[in-house]
Amino acid sequence: MIHSPCQSPTIVPRHPFRGAGGQFLSMTLQLDQVVLDSLDLRPGEVVADLGAGSGYFTFRISPKVGETGKVLAVEIQEAMLNTLRARAARMKATNVEVVQGSEIDPHLPVSGVTLCLWWTFITSWLFHLR
């Protein structure tokens, strides 16, 4: 089953914007929570985070699926794969499995994935530029 939230998740800036940017940051955090809530995640589910990057959603999903679930953090960039592995080890997120995908194949199991989350940087920023 693939869930498709109506709104795209966004990237939270490291440094809050000044002025009206505070509203942007607040809206971003609220939107991220809307996305997570809309996924209706349950313990034991297997979630594929396609294009996981540094794991922004991966490590928010991990506690929701619990010890009996799994998050497949799929990434193609070696630097991000290393970041994901290090972060999973540091956070003791034993239910996070880092998967090296490719441009044409995410290398996911044929069956057993409950949900796929996929979002892009461009979509996220275009949502806020309207």
Image (cartoon, rainbow, N blue to C red):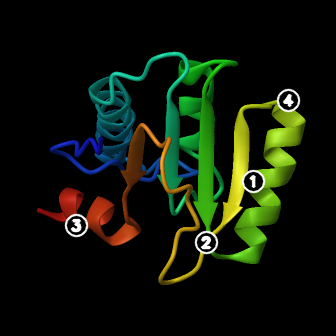
Q: Residues within 10 Å of mark 4 (few under 14, many from 20)?
A: few
**Mark number displayed over residue 84:** 1
Q: Amino acid at mark 3?
A: Leu
Earlier sequence position, callout 1 versus callout 4? 1
Mark 2, residue position: 101
**Callout 1 touching callout 3 (CB < 8 Å):** no
Residue 80 drawn above or below residue 84: below
Earlier sequence position, callout 1 versus callout 2? 1
Q: Residues within 10 Å of mark 2 (few under 14, many from 20)?
A: some
**Callout 1 touching callout 4 (CB < 8 Å):** no
Q: Is 79 situated left or right of 72 in this image?
A: right
Earlier sequence position, callout 4 versus callout 3? 4
Q: Amino acid at mark 2?
A: Gly
Residue 73 drawn at (x, y percent) = 62, 52
Earlier sequence position, callout 3 versus callout 2? 2
Mark 3, residue position: 126
The answer to which of 36 and 98 lies nearer the viewer is: 98
Q: Nearer the viewer, mark 1 or mark 3?
A: 1
The answer to which of 93 and 17 lies nearer the viewer is: 93
Q: Quadrant of the N terminus?
A: top left
Q: Is 122 situated left or right of 59 in this image?
A: left
Q: Residue at x 59, y 60 (%)?
A: 74
**Callout 4 touching callout 3 (CB < 8 Å):** no
Residue 45 drawn at (x, y percent) = 50, 27
Mark 4, residue position: 92
Residue 24 drawn above or below residue 122: above
The CA distance from mark 4 to mark 3 is: 34 Å
The answer to which of 124 and 128 lies nearer the viewer is: 124
The answer to which of 57 and 127 lies nearer the viewer is: 57
Q: Nearer the viewer, mark 4 or mark 3?
A: 4
